[in-house]
Image (tube, rainbow, N blue to C red):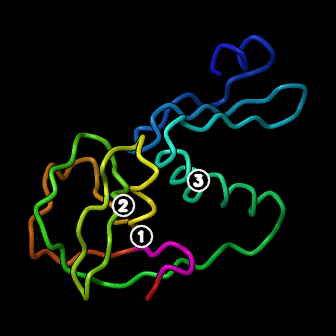
Amino acid sequence: MYDIIEEQGTVLVHGLNFKPGKPVVLGMINEVPIVALPGHPTSSLTVFYEFIMPLIRRNLDAPMAKKQTINAVLGEDVISGNRHELLAVRLEGREVFSASRSSAAITTLAYADGFIEIPADVPMVKKGMEVELTLFEGAFK
């Protein structure tokens, strides 16, 4: 997609230092905004939910969706990488557990209630830590 957008128009952004979503491409072709989302379902939906939907709402002067968040406790250690991460999690009582199998697995989001953010400079989040869970729309049980 990067090559096609560059050949036909202008690439504005190529890649996010974010997990999931590194291969995102934003561009313009004939004054039409183009968004190339990652190919894996979890990455694509997460990037759309967190970045593209707010961009569309802002450009349409539509109200921003209010995110529903709750505090929860991490039920397991989570090792992260060197990129800012939105980790899909499932909620069990007041504990959250990784729902992530891989960004290629659609079942990751099927089992997830929302996500937690892990900053790039945090290599590990320990079991028992309090985290803020951002719920997917309508996911609160």
For label 2, the crowd category at 10 Å Cα-Cα, with few meaning under 14, some 14 to 19 and many 20 or more, is: many
Q: In 3D space, how far apart are the residues under numbered discs 2 and 1 (Cα atoms)? A: 6 Å
The secondary element bearing badge 1 is classed as strand
Residue carrying label 2:
88
The reply to whether callout 1 and callout 3 are in contact (CB within 8 Å) is no
Quick check: 92 above or below 112? below
**Which of the two labelled residues, at mark 2 and mark 3, occupies the earlier sequence position?**
3
**Near-viewer residue (28 or 43):** 43
Q: Which disc number belongs to residue 51?
A: 3
Q: Which residues are magenta?
A: 134-139
Helix, strand or loop for the magenta stretch, by majority: loop
In this view, the mark in front (1 or 3): 1
Q: Residue at x 42, y 70 (%)?
A: 114
Q: In 3D space, how far apart are the residues under numbered discs 1 and 3 (Cα atoms)? A: 15 Å
The reply to whether callout 2 and callout 1 are in contact (CB within 8 Å) is yes
- Give the percent coordinates (x, y) of residue 133: 35, 75
- Give the percent coordinates (x, y) of residue 22: 45, 35
- Give the percent coordinates (x, y) of residue 48: 60, 52
The secondary element bearing badge 3 is classed as helix
Q: Residue at x 55, y 52 (%)?
A: 45
The amino acid beneath tag 2 is Ala
Residue carrying label 1:
114
